[in-house]
Amino acid sequence: MIEVRGLSKTYRVPVKKPGLAASFRSFFDREYKEVHAVADLSFSIAAGERVGFLGPNGAGKTTTLKMLSGLLYPTSGKIDVAGHVPQAREPAFLQRITLVMGQKQQLLWDLPAQETFELNRAMYGVDRKAYRETLDELVALLRAEPLLERPVRNLSLGERMKCELIAALIHRPQLLFLDEPTIGLDVEMQVQVRQFIAEHNRRTGATVILTSHYMQDIAALTPRLLIIDQGRLRFDGAVDTLTRQVAPERRVVVQQVLPELVPLGFSATEGRMVATVPAEAVNALLQRVLAVAPLVELGVEVPPLDEVIGRVFRGNRAEEGA
Amino acid sequence: MSAGAPEERVWLGSGPGARVTHLIRAWPAVLRVAFAGLVAYRAEMVIWVLSATLPLVMLSLWNAASTGGPVGGYDQLAFTRYFAVNLVVRQLTGSWIVWELNWAIRKGELSPKLLRPMNPLVYNFAETLSALPFRAGVLLPLVGALAWWRPEVLFLPSPTVFFAFVASVLASFILAWTVQALFGMLAFWFEQSMGFWSAWFAIWSLLAGYFVPLDLFPAWAVAGTRLLPFYSTLGAPIDVLLGKVDPASTLATQWGWVVALSALAALTWRTGIRRYGAVGA
């Protein structure tokens, strides 16, 4: 579905120091600095996959998404999306994809969302019967019926995102680019959007590519991760693989303070005893704990995903600093 | 969604023929939604439309100036006719794409529009067209009031002149929109590109026949200014209807500008879009 080879994007941005004199100088002799937003990225994504792009702010994930969807021209490298060169934005390509941006909207602000749906129906050349079916299904899945007739400006952020999703899916795209689709939404609405995307993917088999700051989005939606940092691909694989690679240790937790566990490698934190050991040593440790204190409540924790990701980024920085 | 497997889908073709067919099919819905959008802004729209009534102000000035006798061949009736037609042409050829495009490019609002299978420029052109009934609705009472104030202003052009006028207004409409689109696209290169537009508008006001009929200029300047694009966007249809110029050569100049500037706009769009930064997520 997607083939990316040696993809790079370099922006040329004007540099200006603060102050009037600097403004004046900059008017006559503007300095530019090259920013390598994306550098030599290569990967492929198969039809029907769900992939998460992860990285800190300014890592290049949104730039990559914009190049894949045809909004930005790459500086160098090759992209093939469903047999098309994205930036040519041929109608047959645009009809196959959609891009939902959490911070940009396509809904017509002063009109009910229905009008945007109708406009998209016409622009994408969807026949009325298919349009009706798709719309009914999307509205039911998102429970959006009461929202359709109100002007978009009177909708809450979450309600608007529901309508954005409908507008983006009216033409039944095979490839969904979702850029921070849950940004700014409250927890309940985030869950609804996540459930919707998962359900939509299950029903249609569409390929989903998602960027997000929320680990829950990634954990719930995308079995495969592409970690991008400073424009480079740092990891490509399953979430479990990443955890094994970066954080092979487990935390064994005893829910009370027991000084007799200290010799086994435990230390007391916040009313609990915690020991960090390699995954393969967990079973042996559990048996030794139970031998010392047979009646304690025990748990084994995998480091949370955001901690794992944090380690990947810190590791990269350390590597580059060295 | 689940209805209809992908292979049953009709994909939009990429050739020019397929694009035109698609456009024709989509056109009614696009016009309808665009019109609904304009109606949603009815207060703003009335103000916009009324702000284009400057010709009436110019009329009152020239009317006062010509009380003692004709100015450069224009008596009070001639001035009234000139600015009445000026008002009509200006209303019918109004567009706002320069502001919209400038905003969309600088704020990244162009992104969602670029990803729909209809060029954002084509969509804006449809929006501009859809405003015509609205503009005509505002024009009627204004022209009615003028005719009531000075009934002799009304006259019946010959069918040939009338059709030449229609063709000329159409050229002005396309040209005025294209020039605005061109200035709007400068936002791909310049952050403060609206300054260029202000400069153009100042020169335009003088050379398009907006404030002054061009034949009041010194004789040596008249022929030259009539060849410039400014005149083609406003003065030309007025003078065609009032029988002051040869319709055939005037139409040739106008449509020549339409072809040249449309080609320039298409080229500018293709070049500019590569620079588009799609800012702000």
Image (cartoon, coloured by chain):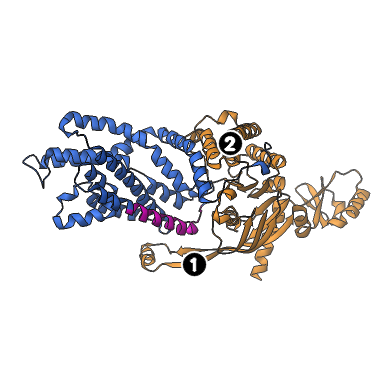
Q: Position of residue B251 (x, y in %)?
A: 29, 49
Quarter of the rendering containing residue A256 = top right
Q: Residue at x 18, y 57 (%)?
A: B221
Circle 1 — which element? strand
Marks 1 and 2, the one that precedes in the sequence: 1
* Crowd tier of the residue under label 2, counting other residues whose Cα lies within 10 Å: few below 14, some 14–19, many 20 or above: few
For the stretch drawn in magenta, what is the main secondary structure?
helix
Magenta stretch contains residue B268: yes
Say if B254 sits above or below A6 in the image: above
Chain to which mark 1 belongs: A
Using residue B100 as the reference point, say whether residue A286 is left or right of it: right
Instruction: Count every numbered label the image shows and give the total.
Output: 2
Residue A33 is tagged as: 1
Residue A115 location in percent, x, y? Answer: 51, 34
Confirm whether the magenta stretch covers residue A290: no
For residue B52, say whether it is visible.
no
Q: Quadrant of residue B56?
A: top left
Q: Which residues are magenta?
A: B256-279
Element on which disc 2 rests: loop
Instruction: Quickly name the residue at label 2.
Output: A127
In x, y percent, where is residue A9? Answer: 56, 62
Letter of the blue chain: B
Q: Residue furthest bottom?
A: A322
Judging depth in this view, the residue of B166 and A147 nearest the camera is B166
Q: Which amino acid lies under the numbered mark 2 shown in the image of this protein?
A: Asp
Q: Disc 2: which chain? A: A
Answer left or right for A121 relative to A240.
left
Q: Is residue A66 visible?
A: yes
Q: How dense is the environment of label 1, judged by Cα within 10 Å: few (below 14), some, or many (20 and up)?
A: few
**Chain A's colour?**
orange
Query: Which mark lies nearer to you, 1 or 2?
Result: 2
